[in-house]
Amino acid sequence: MRLARRSRTLTVVGARTALIIAALVLVEALVRGGLISPFALAPSSEIIEKIVGLVRDGTVVGPLLQTLVEVAITFVVVAIAGVFVGFCSWRWGLLRRSIEPLMLAVYAIPTIVFYPILLVVFGIGAPSVMAMGFLLGFTPIVLGVRDALGSVDPVLVRMATVLGATPLAKYAKVIFPAALPGVGAALRLGFSYVVIGIISGEFLVSTGGLGKLVANYYDGFQVSSMYAAAVFIVLLSAVINSLLERLK
Amino acid sequence: MSFRVNPAIVLVVVALAIWQAAGAGTSSFVTVVGTPVTVARAFAIVVSSQSTWVNVGITALELLVGLSVAIVLGLVVSLGMGTDGIAHEVVSPFFTIGNTVPKIVILPAFLMLFGIGFLSKAAFGALHGVFPIAVIVSSGVRRVIASEQVRAATALNASKRQIVFHVLLPSVLPYLVTALRLSVSLTLLGVVLAEMYLAKAGLGFMIMRWYGEFQVPKMLSAVILIGALAFTLDFILRRFEAAIWRTHGIRANS
């Protein structure tokens, strides 16, 4: 049984690797074979070479650090604000009924359309970019935290009351621990939204960061560097997201 | 008849009133952004202009084309990987993770491959829209295949074809509608993003043009238009989704 599962895992990992290699070969062949112009797509080998170059010669370090700092600060702020508002909207029905329809409405709108408003208010630079990350991350955290608290089994709470728990103990020992997995999921989702918001803002209008790096290469017609930076960002966020996924 | 005030509407009205009242002062925020009244005036001008509706039409068409591509691709992927356990395990992480990475950084690739214009905008929309369909519908297919309906149909000697058309597809329908709602808002996001970056037409283009010209009330009017479009589509699809889950949803057996 265990052996069977192991061979299944091997098959899956092998198939995934094969898929990735096939995609790389396809891209290489399309460009080398002249089916796609080298001004539109770079061969895989060149992209990989440039990624190594970006990391080795330190080009990526400055933008990477800037983006990471922006993400870190924004995530801490949005996590605190989102958990707080999520808690309040779970606790007080009036607040929930006032803000929830608005948040759901905003959720349906492509949030990036608010970015120019942020640019007008905060100017071009890190504050606008971070505000964009905040806007994108806030709603999923608030809604997720409220759902997590709302789905705590009322039997547990009643049980605690019967056993004479003080209100404080009820929160600290029963409600919060029970809601923790849901809150964690909300924060994880919020994190990837913050990253998306910040890199989108950087890419559209900004003064620096990873998103700006790609936009600069595009403006300078540096096709292979542009692909290298884009692939680097996608891989980086995929790795971070799957690490966070594993954390649960 | 009891009269109940919707607190969300009260909140919006209060916020607008504060914004308008701030306009009486001389805060720099208000001189740049305008007041609700100046924005409303700009909105009236914007919606009475014919070029606005040309741009709305372009965005809507890009959304429609992008969405169609996303649905077809998403369904092909879902049926392909949903009906096979191993294939699902192999491919689904690409879609789950792809859903959470900042796809904007590959927008230049779309501009280079499809050119600046309609095609790249619709394709970029499709790129955003395909993920929820692939993820949700394929998990729906997995769930339906494990359900009693399929076992019952197999026991009754239904052919594979009959199972797909008479059991699988009708049971997957609710998942498709849920996925469709998310896909519509994400495709719109992709389309608008592409319009905001480098385009000559569309609602996103209008926003960035008026941002560049510093015509903030007009820019806000375009934001309101996109918001209204997104909200209306979401509202209709939510209704539809609720109705279809009521009538078609399989009872959870998982």
Image (spheres, coloured by chain):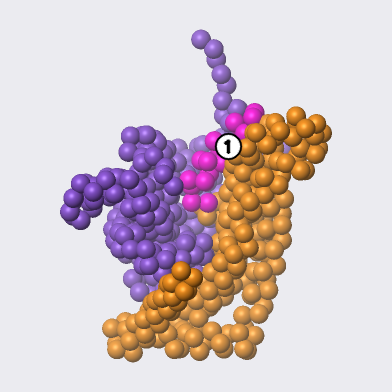
Where's residue B29, x and y in %?
67, 46
- Magenta stretch: includes residue A59: no
Farthest top residue in view:
B1
Residue at 28% x, 49% y is B150
Q: Quadrant of residue B2?
A: top right
Q: Quadrant of residue A35?
A: bottom left
Q: Dot 1 falls on which chain?
A: A
In the figure, the shade used to draw chain B is purple
Disc 1 element? helix
- Label 1: which residue? A100
- Magenta stretch: includes residue A101: yes
In the figure, the shade used to draw chain A is orange
Indicate left or right for B73 with A85 as reference: left
Residue at 47% x, 85% y is A47
Residue at 35% x, 48% y is B147
Q: Is residue A217 above or below residue B162?
A: below
Which amino acid type is marked by label 1? Glu
Q: Is residue B153 above or below residue A228?
A: above
For the residue pair A222 and A173, the one nearer the viewer reads as: A173
Q: Which residues are magenta?
A: A93-111
Where's residue B193, x and y in %?
46, 59
